[in-house]
Amino acid sequence: MHNALIGSMHNELFLNVYRVTAIKIRMAVQYRLRVTRFNAERVGREHLAFLIPMREGHAEAAKSALQQHLDNSLTLALGGMIA
């Protein structure tokens, strides 16, 4: 899903930066992040929280929810915890 979203921007530089960053993050956190029911549900909710407003044209709500998703992802990638 992430590749499709980034790819839809048709910006090769942005896509390449995303790919490299995603690989590095996966390598750095792979040993401590596990796919669990809780994580899958949380991530699903986070994605829906910005995809639905995006589809409905509510830019500010989509932007806010996307920022929360990015903040959560960064926190986890850096070893932090989220509620």
Image (cartoon, helix red, strand yellow):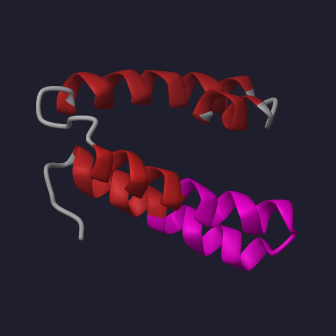
Q: Quadrant of residue 77?
A: top left
**Residue 42 image point, x, y percent:** 39, 57
Q: Nearer the viewer, residue 47 or 64?
A: 47
Location of the N terminus by quadrant is top right
Question: In terms of secondary structure, what is the magenta stretch mainly?
Answer: helix
Is 51 displayed left or right of 46 in the figure? right
Is 67 displayed left or right of 62 in the figure? left
**Residue 17 image point, x, y percent:** 53, 28
Is 69 displayed left or right of 60 in the figure? left
**Residue 47 image point, x, y percent:** 57, 54
Q: Nearer the viewer, residue 73 or 12?
A: 73
Would you say residue 59 sits in the magenta stretch? yes
Q: Residue furthest right?
A: 57
Is 4 drawn above or below residue 73 in the view shown?
A: above
Q: Quadrant of residue 32?
A: top left
Numbered range of the magenta stretch: 47-68
